[in-house]
Amino acid sequence: MRIAIFDSGVGGITVLREVLALIPGNDYIYYADTRNVPYGIKPKNEVKQYILDAVEFLSGRNIQAMVVACNTATSVAIDELRKRFDFPILGMEPAIKPAILNNTGKKILVLATSLTLCESKLGALIRMLDKNQKVEKLEMNKLVEYAEIFDFSSDEVKLYLKEKLLRLPIEEYETIVLGCTHFIYYKRLIEEIVGKGIAVIDGNEGTVRNLVNMIQKNYSVDSKKETTITFYSSGIE
Ligand code: DGL
C-alpha cells in the first residue's frame, strides 16, 4: 500500500515512527510543508490553502490513504479534505478523551498551537466530553519553531518550558495532553519539569491504531514486502 503522512514540518515524523513499528511493509510518503511552517500562528484560511495545495500534490502520487499527522491541519481542514479527495484520510486530535476517562479529579492541561486551541473542533470535543470542566488550554507555539531548527534540549528551550509550565499552579493538574505532533519531542523534558505525579500523553497511538484498523478492514497487506519511505518537502523560500 502507498500511504502518505503529512505535517507542516518534522512533527509528523513522531507519527511515522509509530506507524513503521506497527505496520511495516508499505510504501510511505512523508510530506513536510517546510515552506509554510509554522501553521499554528497563522490565519485559518491561509493555513487551509497550504494544506489543500500539499494534499493536491500528494493526490497525484497514487496514494491509497493519508494520515494528517498534525493537529492544527486536522482542525482547520479535515472536513474539506474528505470532501475533495476520495482516498481515506485520518486526522489527529488532542488525546482529551483518554485524559477525561482516566480523570481522578484534578485538572487536565492541553498544550497545542494557538490555531488548534481556538478552532471549533477542539471546542466541540471539550464541550462533549468535559462535563466536570477539568480541561484547560495553553499555547506552546514556540516549540514548533524550536523543533524545526532541531533544538530539542538547549537551555533556551528548557527555560521556555519552565516559564510556561511553572507559571501555573502545576500541582493542580494530573494530566498534560500534547496536542501537537511537534511537542512530542519535548515529552521527556516536560515530564522532568512537572514531576512524576503528572501523566504526559499524546494522540499518536490512537491515530496509528485507527490507521491499522482502516488498513486491515480494506486491504490485504503483504508483511514480507520491504518498507520504503519517500520524503518530500515544499522547501524554504
Ligand atoms: N505539528 C502541528 C500540530 O500537530 C503544528 C505545527 C505548526 O504550527 O505548524 O499541530
Image (cartoon, grey):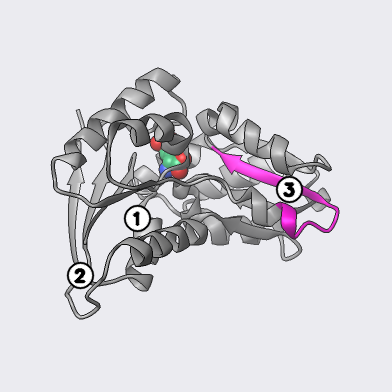
Q: Residue at x 43, y 45 (%)?
A: 91
The disc, 3 or 1, on the residue closer to the chain's N-terminal end is: 1
Left or right: where 29 falls relative to 97:
left
The quarter of the rendered structure image containing the C terminus is: top left
Gap between marks 1 and 2, in whole Å?
15 Å
User: Which amino acid type corresponds to the residue marked 1 in the rendered image?
Assistant: Ile
Compared to residue 219, the image places residue 155 above or below, namely above
User: Which amino acid type corresponds to the residue marked 2 in the rendered image?
Assistant: Thr
Is residue 108 inside the magenta stretch?
yes
Residue 227 is labelled as 2
- What count of labels does the image hold? 3
Residue 128 location, quadrant: top right
- Residue topped by disc 1: 13
Magenta residues, start to end: 100-112
Secondary structure at numbered mark 3:
strand
How crowded pointer 3 is (Cα within 10 Å; few <14, some 14-19, many 20+) is rated as many
Determine if residue 163 is in view: no
User: Which amino acid type corresponds to the residue marked 3 in the rendered image?
Assistant: Ile
Compared to residue 3, the image places residue 156 above or below, namely above
Cβ–Cβ below 8 Å for labels 3 and 2? no
- Residue topped by disc 3: 108
Left or right: where 181 falls relative to 197:
left
From this viewpoint, which residue is outermost toward the front? Answer: 218
Gap between marks 3 and 2, in whole Å?
38 Å
Left or right: where 227 falls relative to 213:
left
The quarter of the rendered structure image containing the N terminus is: bottom left
Gap between marks 3 and 1, in whole Å?
26 Å
Task: Give the foreground label among 3 and 2.
Answer: 2
